[in-house]
Image (cartoon, rainbow, N blue to C red):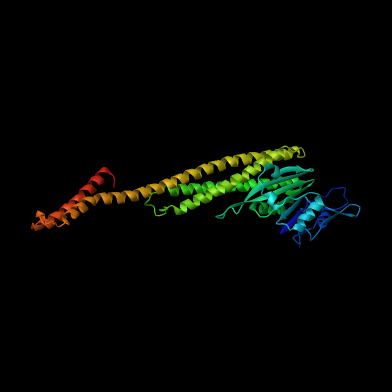
Amino acid sequence: MDTNEFFAPLRATADDGNSADAVAADNVGVENGEPAATTAQAPAKITANALGKTTSTATKQDGGKADRTPVWIDLLSPTPDEIHDIEERFGIEVPTREEMQEIELSSRLYDEDGALFMTVSVLTRATTDAPQTTAVTFILVKKTLITLRYADPVPFKTFIRRVKRSPSLANSAEAVLFGLLEQIVDRLADLMEQTATDLENLSNQVFASPEDIASDQDHRETLRQIGRTGNLSGKAKDSLLNLHRLGLFLSTQTRLKKDAKARLKVISRDIVSITEHANFIANKVTFLLDATLGMISLEQNNIIKIFSVAAAAFLPPTLIASIYGMNFEFMPELGWEFGYPVAIGLMILSAVLPLWYFKRKGWL
């Protein structure tokens, strides 16, 4: 459980009666229970407060105090009490974990009393042998973005670090939403680039010469890597499909300003281009899988061919040995002085001649 609130930066003006240092002093917050540092050069400071622990307040000009509205509330594996607090605070109904897993479009993207509910699948554990997708819900209510998630994907960690370095990235709920979407798309793009590089190495490995020491003779490891790459690209395409639907949903919202829609259009174009790259990777995975299975079939055919040639080569000697092993009384060769060496010579010759013929035909 790790629930944080992020506040928009404070800005000092010429007529507020306070210096930049004074504003910075008033804007010192608590981040997970620890004091957050501020500087005079950057009076606009982001504050991250754990729900139920600390409540930040901003000093007004008349000396009174009022709660500041957070631009982003990040709910990571929240408790039922925390979810209840959010529902009471914003007058919304937070979807349950089971509802977040539903695949119906109406259950993932909808407008409820002015609050936008958007659920997408985000790729996580992408660098492991078992990549997964986790459902993340974005709730845009008034001037606050609420994210509900039960995993910690890399894009969220990266964006939080960026916001702590540059608080201006979180100056509004829409800015946080688009910042997170951009970070998710960037992460998917990086993964697709790395996957394309891995597939290139796999291609070289599949079509490597059998004499190459580094070649995978039994192709077990190659098949495992191809399967993992195909699984990763499939989950990435699922995440991109969800992001594309979210972009279409947001493009119909009149509450978004012109610059926000322009930013959304750029994100949508990136999603389309990465989806095309993901389709290319999926086709290459299929090609490499078919090629690997074809290589395995060729090797199996070569093994069967060797056994077939051996059986055909030793069939005449077996026939000769069977005839002279019957020991009939009136077999003239049995009493012949040179019968035994002649029989051995016939068996050798009957084995060598087929092998020579197969070699001449190129069957060996």
Q: Position of residue 242 (x, y in %)?
A: 65, 44
Left-right relation of 223 to 212: right
Left-right relation of 221 to 33: left
Q: Which of 227 and 180 is in front in this view?
A: 227
Q: Where is residue 296 in the image (x, y as percent from the top left)?
A: 41, 49
Q: Position of residue 119 (x, y in %)?
A: 69, 47
Q: Is residue 186 above or below residue 24?
A: above
Q: Which of 22 and 28 is in front in this view?
A: 28
In this rendering, the count of numbered labels is: 0
Q: In the displayed orientation, state which residue is furthest to the bottom.
A: 34
Left-right relation of 347 to 271: left
Q: Nearer the viewer, residue 18 or 288?
A: 288
**Which residue occupies 50% across, 52% down?**
225
Whether residue 294 appears in this view of the structure is yes
Whether residue 43 appears in this view of the structure is no
The quarter of the image holding the N terminus is bottom right
**Which residue occupies 24% across, 50% down?**
313
Quarter residue 116 falls in:
top right
Q: Where is residue 159 in the image (x, y as percent from the top left)?
A: 68, 51
Q: In this view, does 65 lie above or below 108?
A: below
Left-right relation of 111 to 242: right
Q: Which of 255 and 303 is in front in this view?
A: 303
Q: In the displayed orientation, state which residue is furthest to the front.
A: 329
